[in-house]
Amino acid sequence: MRKIALILLCFLLYSAQSQAQLSIGDEAPEIKLPDSLGKWKPLSEVKSKIILIDFWAAWCYPCVKSMPDVVKLYEKYKDLGLQVYAVSLDKDYYSWVEMCKKLKLPFILVNDAYGLNGNASKDYKVTSIPNKMLIKEGKIIGAEMSLYDLEKIIQKELQQ
């Protein structure tokens, strides 16, 4: 009986890990969320060669700490075709807006007040933040990587 329980546990853990996040080559699900003014910003309407989706929140210290690097990356590659679509998982609208102002975020900013329980997080299988992914032509081309490794992909893709 113990062996069966152990095998079942291993199977469940493996299944959960394989479902952890979208993989490279997967279709990027649509995201349609409001910006700070309540205007809907669908991901499908972003016209750019590469899109960096950044799941983050104002209350998340590692997220906030990484934002200046995301801004630098955006400024460096925006003219070559990079856009950042920052999906905030903040429930507190005012904290989110204030943090965006404080950090002077220059890219697309949307909010899912349902946090990790929202459709965007569920569709992208995001279970923790910060979480960044790269999209090109509607497909995931980078996931579960550091910002440094994502930049290598951006450089390669935008120099072609």
Image (tube, helix red, strand yellow):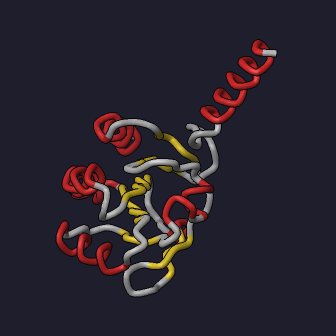
Q: Nearer the viewer, residue 67 or 76?
A: 67
Q: Nearer the viewer, residue 76 or 100?
A: 100
Q: Please name the residue shown 36% across and 39% down the image.
A: 150
Q: Is residue 63 above or below residue 98?
A: above
x and y percent of residue 99 in the render?
24, 70
Relative to 46, is 150 on the left or the right? left
Relative to 125, is 112 on the left or the right? left
Q: Please name the residue shown 58% across and 39% down the image.
A: 20
Q: Is residue 103 above or below residue 21?
A: below
Q: Is residue 56 above or below residue 133?
A: below
User: What is the quadrant of residue 29 in the picture?
Assistant: bottom right
User: What is the quadrant of residue 48 in the picture?
Assistant: bottom left
Viewport quadrant of the C terminus = top left
User: What is the quadrant of residue 2 in the picture?
Assistant: top right
Q: Please name the residue shown 40% across and 36% down the image.
A: 145
Q: Is residue 95 above or below residue 89?
A: below
